[in-house]
Each structure stands twice: as structure tokens, then as C-alpha cells.
Amino acid sequence: MTPPKDEAEGISLIATNRKAFHDYFISDKVEAGIVLKGTEVKALREGGCNLKDSYARVTPGGEAEILNFHISPYRAGNRFNSDPTRSRRLLMHKREILKLGQKLREKGLTLVALRIYFRRGIAKLELGVGKGKAEHDKRAAIKDREGKREAASAMKVRSR
């Protein structure tokens, strides 16, 4: 039996932002490294993080940073723990940052955190360029998903 694709690439998933796919149309995805302190890495290995309201931005100085990304304090970290929701710098090539900055200047686009994982022991963050969904778009997505689920269950019953 072959291992799943993520395990074959040395990826161990920590957290995903399922709400992002509900609230945004995701057009492009980008992978970025993230600058963390030692206790934050240990807390991530324990799975103590939340991507729910996190987003990234490109600063006027040409750097990318993630905001509202909550990493729970490490239990044994005592005084070395830092603020759980501090802004953290993202590690990407300069041209990637400039390209993202140009896309984000368009009206209604934002850079949303989709998932965080370790690749070969290094913390990586997957970001998506998203355009906000209206309420009727969300309802249509839910209706499509339920229709597909019902069709799959009907095909399953029929094949028996």
C-alpha cells in the first residue's frame, strides 16, 4: 500500500481554515515560510493554533506578514512564550511578494491563510488570494454540496 501524498512529500498537516473556502472564492495559492520563536514551534507541534480569522498583507516596505494567526502558548514555555496573536513575518521571494501586492490592490481581494503544516520539519503556511462571497453565493455552494451528497448516496443505494 502506498502512503498518502502528503506523507510521501514529508508533510504533516497542523491546521486548516475550512471557513476560508466558505467565505471566499480562492483563485491562487502560494506557499510561504513563517518566522516563529522556539516556543511557538513547539506549540504548533502540539497542534495549538487557529487560522480562523487570519489574513496576510504586504507592507509598504515590501514585506509580507500574517495577522490574527493565533498560536496557543506552549505549556512548558513559561516566560519565553510570546503574544499568541502577534503579527509574524512571512518568508517569500521578493518578486512573489511584489506580485501578490499588485493582486491585492485590486478591489475586493484579500490574502487568506488556508492551512499550516510542517514540510521536512519546517513550518509552512499556504495562502490563498480570495474574493469575498456574497450571502447568495454561500447558499448556492451549500445547495450544490448537498445535491452532490444526495446523488452520491442514491448511486450507492442503486449499485447494491
Image (spheres, rainbow, N blue to C red):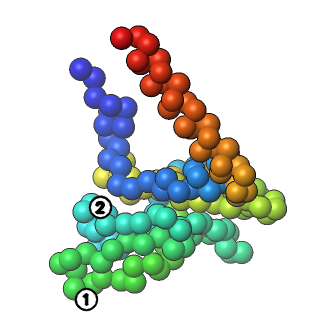
- Name the image quarter holding residue 43: bottom left
Residue type at mark 2 is Gly
Residue 84 image position (x, y, % from top left): 39, 79
Crowding near the residue tagged with mark 2, few <14, some 14–19, many ≥20 C-alpha atoms within 10 Å? some
- Name the image quarter holding residue 100: bottom right
- Name the image quarter holding residue 160: top left
Which quadrant of the rendered structure holds the N terminus?
Answer: top left
Q: Tell me the residue at 36%/37% (across/down).
A: 6
Measured along the vertical axis of the image, is residue 107 above or below residue 61?
above
Residue 56 image position (x, y, % from top left): 59, 66
Measured along the vertical axis of the image, is residue 157 above or below residue 4?
above
Q: Nearer the viewer, residue 84 or 52?
A: 52
Residue 71 image position (x, y, % from top left): 37, 71
Q: Nearer the viewer, residue 148 or 51?
A: 148
User: What residue did someone put label 1 on?
Assistant: 79
Q: Say the numbered circle drawn on residue 47.
A: 2
Judged left or right of residue 36, residue 114 is: right
* Outermost residue toward the top in this view: 159
| Image depth: mark 1 or mark 2 in front | 2
Whether residue 59 is visible to the viewer of this picture, yes or no, is yes
Residue 18 image position (x, y, % from top left): 49, 53
Measured along the vertical axis of the image, is residue 40 above or below residue 136?
below
Residue type at mark 1 is Arg
Q: Tell me the residue at 35%/55% (across/down).
A: 14
Q: Nearer the viewer, residue 118 or 151?
A: 151
Judged left or right of residue 13, residue 74 is: left
Measured along the vertical axis of the image, is residue 15 above or below residue 48?
above
Judged left or right of residue 126, residue 11 is: left
* Outermost residue toward the left in this view: 76
